[in-house]
Image (spheres, helix red, strand yellow):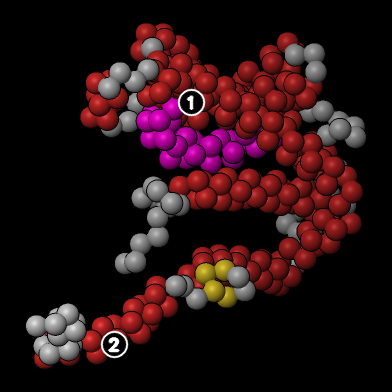
Amino acid sequence: MSARDLRPGAADPEGAAAAPLHALALPLEDELIEATQERRILGLPASAWPKIIAPAAVGLIVLVLWEVLVRALHVPTFILPGPLLIAQTLVREWGPLSSSLWITASISLAALVTAIVIGMALAILFTQSKWIETAFFPYAVVLQVTPVVAIAPLIIIWADNVNLSLLICAWLVAFFPILSNSTLGLNSADHNLLNLFRIYGASRWQTLWNLRLPASMPYFLGGVRISGGLALIGAVVAEFVAGTGGSASGLAFRILESGYNLQIPRMFAALALVSLCGIVIFGCLSLVSYLSLRHWHDSALKREN
């Protein structure tokens, strides 16, 4: 028998049948690949649009009903202004409101960054020594459960700089979720893998860098998303307590100022900017979390079912 006779499909009837089946499998494989590739609309996956359209539609319906009810019931503007009047006030007062927005947002972001650095450093320190965690973690809990409104006046008195006192107040509110979640994540590394690292003689730094930190990433990013909103809340509360005025004033002072002068549309415009700032912070942190986890963690992996 020659080598030519050994080729599939040369003399074997099964080989002759296999060749056309293989040829048919190629287009089927291409169809499966095309089916798994999600269709995109305006650059976004088709599955992402319902998540955008649904809340946008609900918000639009609420705003329309709000405007209709205010006009139908003839509600005075100093009690409840309509969305259109609030939008007009926001455009008209954009100069002072935008500067106040920048001050509040900058304090919130600075407090968040400080909370991330200090919270993660303390979490790593707690993980390396159970004695340190046992000794100091209860005091972190005390700081968390103490209302910032109660200690903000003391911080404002002790700190010479108003912005520094606002930063400290916002940091006190924001840092505990990062500390707590990061400590939990660092302690949640697989104990079998920890024993394997110990058997192979890995140092504490190698174990921390290659095992504990990757295992804590989902917990850490979840804490950061929580702390982003809390930093904004802490900054606004501290501004309320401080009552700072002048050109370097945050949105909280604009709200107080508008309330004292019965400029309720201006107050609602400032409130809208506070809410918008919180939404942007949460959205950006959620995007960072998704981009960090989408290739390896179950919480961000896209499933076929």
79 magenta-colored: no
Q: Image point 65% across, 37% down: which residue?
A: 232
| Horizontal side, residue 302 vs residue 152: left or right | left
Q: Quadrant of the N terminus?
A: bottom left
Residue on which the image places disc 1: 179
Residue on which the image places disc 2: 24
Looking at the rendered structure, the kind of residue marked 2 is Leu
Q: Nearer the viewer, mark 2 or mark 1?
A: 2
219 magenta-colored: yes
Q: Image point 86% across, 52% down: which residue?
A: 94
What percent of the width, then of the height, locates residue 192? 23, 29
Residue 29 vs 209, above or below: the answer is below
* Magenta stretch secondary structure, dominant: helix
- Give the magenta part as a residue range: 209-237
Q: Residues within 10 Å of mark 1 (few under 14, many from 20)?
A: many
Q: Earlier in the sequence, mark 2 or mark 1?
A: 2
Looking at the rendered structure, the kind of residue marked 1 is Leu
Local SS, label 2: helix
Front residue of 169 and 2:
2
